[in-house]
Amino acid sequence: METKPKTTVSTLEERDRTFKRIAWRILPFATLVYIFAWLDRVNVGFAKLTMLDDLGWSDAVYGAGAGIFFFGYFLFEVPSNLLLQKIGAPKTILRIALGWGVVSVLMALCTQPWHFYVLRFLQGAFEAGLHPGLILYLTYWLPAHRRSRAIAIFMSASPIALLLGSPLAAYIMTSTDGLMGFRDWQWLFIIEGVPSIILGLLAVFVMTAKPSEAKWLSQAERDQVAYELDQEAAQMQGREHKFGAALRSRDVWVLILTLFCIITGNATLSFYGPSLITAAGFTDITVVGWIMSGIFLFGWMGMMTNGWLSDRSHESRWHTAVAAALGATGLVLAAFAQEAGSAPGVIAALALSAAGTMGSIPVFWSLPPRFMSGTALAAGVALINSIANLAGYFAPQFLGAIKTATGVYSPGLFIIAGVEFIAVLLILLFIRKEPAETTALPAGKAAAS
């Protein structure tokens, strides 16, 4: 006698409550880990203020060491995500956070340039798997129409870290110089590296790999998660499952180029924002730091608002494109404001650019699962992120070269804005529209799984 599969009935309201509970359980820890990853990534810029003089290094040594981070990042993202698919997110975050935390502490012991190069490369190699790993982790828990806001929440760690990192680094360096025989830059690496080690050790106790392993969910709640994920999988039939096939897919390379163009704008804000504010006439470092904090506050607001709007409308293509267009427009306006000598105009334009550019990134990450799943998604997300983040290496160097050649930033800003506008064209011309949604059923209707 044939046995019928067990059927569970749930309403949209019940599933909404379940996914809200999941978000409160998995997102705070992921966000906290990502905040310290960003702090440990960018604190070298503050350490530079005294580190170079203490060690007798040139700016060329610093530039080479700062940039080599991205090559470690590039080489190890795909292997890290493939490993996450096998061993799960808790063990992966343990390895990643523990590794980069130890490396950050060891940075305090640098005495030779090659120490700096090796440690920065290792820091990039360890951190490489974090961003794509957390993106992949969320696909195990949340369907696409619930994912943009979640990605925006944990990715808000980057503007939060940039917003808080400047005053925090300044406080550490002014409060610890000479303590126990260590210099201020050494304490900066130690104090901001230790929390990452602790978070790594906590990961295996705090994180749950997949909904099926979540003892803190009832069986009915696990069934509700499975139902929405199964519905999404049924809609997305035809996605690539094998990495080799995904690698040959035009869609994947369009996504890589799109994110590269967006990151070009984002890296300009992150690495040259203070210089643009200084060029506008603000010379006090403390004032510049607080202005940049305000600009990155707009970046955080852009992330949260655009993620919420994308989930609410069940649409990610236009939300990514429009936000990127605003980001590029802000850079154009910043260039015009600099040429006009308007300091308030520069600040307002950079705030607009931060809101648009940063707001586009979390919604962008709702696009890859539309084309890939399984191993292809694990490796594809890492490949997209690793190649696109090379913009973080090239964009600042390009803008610096243009500034050196012309004496002003505006020509470089116009060009970088043009690159970011290319992302808008790629999305609208080559990324197909979402399929009709069926998972978000009207309130009160039952769904069987």
Image (tube, rainbow, N blue to C red):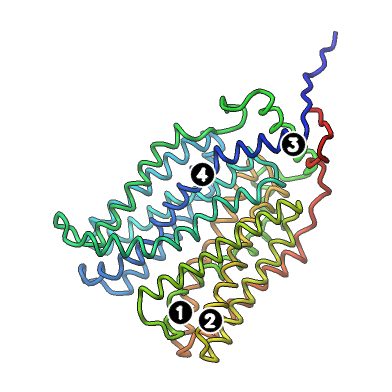
Residue identifier under label 1: 277
* Mark sitting on residue 424: none
Residue identifier under label 3: 13
Crowding around mark 1 (Cα neighbors within 10 Å: few <14, some 14 to 19, many 20+) is many
Amino acid type of the residue that numbered disc 3 sits on in the rendered structure: Glu
Q: CA distance from mark 4 to mark 3?
A: 23 Å
Quarter of the image for residue 141 reads top right
Q: CA distance from mark 1 to mark 3?
A: 48 Å
**Where's the N terminus, which quadrant?**
top right
Q: Could you tell me which secondary element the residue under label 2 belongs to?
A: helix
Mark nearer the N terminus (4 vs 2): 4
Q: Could you tell me which secondary element the residue under label 3 belongs to?
A: helix
Q: Disc 2 or disc 3, which is closer to the eye?
A: 3
User: Can residue 237 be seen in this snapshot?
Assistant: no
Mark nearer the N terminus (1 vs 2): 1
Crowding around mark 4 (Cα neighbors within 10 Å: few <14, some 14 to 19, many 20+) is few
Residue identifier under label 4: 28
Drawn side of residue 253 relative to residue 387, left or right: right
Residue in view at x 55 percent, y 39 percent: 26
Q: CA distance from mark 4 to mark 1?
A: 32 Å
Mark nearer the N terminus (4 vs 3): 3
Q: Could you tell me which secondary element the residue under label 1 belongs to?
A: helix
Q: How far across and down, in percent of the image, does residue 334 sit?
A: 56, 81
Q: CA distance from mark 2 to mark 3?
A: 46 Å
Residue identifier under label 2: 346
Q: Mark 1 and 2 residues: CB-CB less than 8 Å, in contact?
A: yes
Q: Residue furthest top?
A: 1
User: Can residue 86 be seen in this snapshot?
Assistant: yes
